[in-house]
Amino acid sequence: MATTQTRAEATINDILNAAEIHFGQRNYADVSMSDIAYLADVTKGALYHHFKNKEALYVAMLTRDLEEKRIIFQQAVDAPGTCRDRLELSTKLLFQMPEAKRRLIRLVRRDINIFKGKTRALLVKAYQDALPQSVQAIIQAGIDTGEIAPGDARLLAWEYIALVEVVLTDYAQDTLGGPEQCVQFVLNLFLNGAGTQ
Amino acid sequence: MATTQTRAEATINDILNAAEIHFGQRNYADVSMSDIAYLADVTKGALYHHFKNKEALYVAMLTRDLEEKRIIFQQAVDAPGTCRDRLELSTKLLFQMPEAKRRLIRLVRRDINIFKGKTRALLVKAYQDALPQSVQAIIQAGIDTGEIAPGDARLLAWEYIALVEVVLTDYAQDTLGGPEQCVQFVLNLFLNGAGTQ
DNA sequence: AAACATACCTACTGGTTGGTATGTTCAAGA
DNA sequence: TCTTGAACATACCAACCAGTAGGTATGTTT
């Protein structure tokens, strides 16, 4: 059984990897199942053998990726130190990812309108568990210790992520300095603001 | 001649308005020309009489909208007062827009990958002229007067817009307070940061 | 009112895509 | 080694959609 499953699992892996690449670069509707099958070096038959339909494939791809990320960012939540230290770690982990993985971070926000109901809720939750939840936990701890001014930790988490995403975009286009500078820029902006003190 | 053009112009207007609604809610590829024609209460023939193809319609729709916005935000650039005052005005103008128009603000970022070459450059420039340019001008002035700490005004402008967009999203879902509170929240976060001073 | 131009409609095509029906290979157990 | 079911491949279909061809209606000009 192990051998059989290994082969199928390898195929599924190839398909998911191909899906990551395509969905990461283009809109959902612009990516065809044939594109994914071709890149994964399997046929459409094999593809539909493992995934019920296009939506199921997308969900599987994104779910797998977000679960990976959730585990990674959990490090920052569990880490010791000040709020700033832990936000720094969290952001560093983001910048250390390969570009293809980093690109997927913005996927949920970009494609949030294409699904409805359960599927949509599922993806949003998976995303929130992966990144916003971690950041929110760190920020809430910061509020409790007085390092962060009292406020809505959830909203602040989203704001922090938005700041990171902007720098991440510029970073991908090589218009900024190294990852270390980027991380410090975001941290200073978020904690101290852009105004002169 | 005036009468003839008026009729055509009215049709074009209907089409562009319908396009705004559809493209604002769904991805480019998910919106069909038939959808737009139906909502505009014209036939596809009329649609293709006025617009060369789908891409041309999208460009026309977004260009018109961004030019409107550019003019609106220019008010804030030309306004007197501190950097904070002018950023406040700029942000207020955003929150005062009807929801459909507000939604279009995120369109360029969402659909940035569907076009290549000239079309893409054109849309990006129209967007930058409309919003980022205004914010950047205000921030640069703030840096010059010492109200904002020295730094990359362009990047800071993008960061500010990102902060606004997050609140705008929450605001659209009625999970936040009134527009005035939202504006002040963003301003404080951007200028003073989230940390305790 | 003839000649013309613009605006618009109906009906269709060619191409693409998600999905399927059916056939073939492979791997493991009896 | 023979069987059996899972894992694929091939060939295809039905639906949809961007875009077009060709005709009709509504002005406008002279």
Image (cartoon, coloured by chain):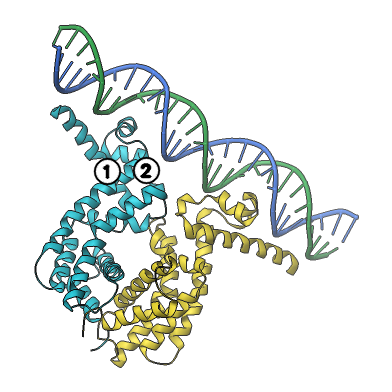
Chain colours: A cyan, B yellow, C blue, D green
Regarding residue A194, the answer to whether it shows in the image is no
Q: From this viewpoint, is residue A179 visible?
A: yes
Q: Nearer the viewer, residue A31 or A120?
A: A120
**Foreground: B57 or B161?**
B161
Three-letter residue code for mark 2? Glu
Is B192 situated above or below C14?
A: below
Please indicate whether residue B2 sits to the left or right of residue B141 in the image: right
From the image, tell me which residue sits under label 2: A55
Name the quadrant containing residue A5: top left
- Spatial CA distance of label 1 from label 2 is 15 Å
Q: Are marks 1 and 2 in contact (CB under 8 Å)?
A: no
Front in this rendered view, residue A120 or B110: A120
Relative to residue A120, is residue B164 depicted above or below? below
Instruction: Please name the amino acid that badge 1 sits on.
Output: Ala
Total marks placed: 2
Give the image location of residue A8, x and y in percent.
Answer: 21, 32
Position of the C terminus of chain B, as image quadrant, is bottom left
**Residue A127: where, in percent of width, then height?**
28, 56
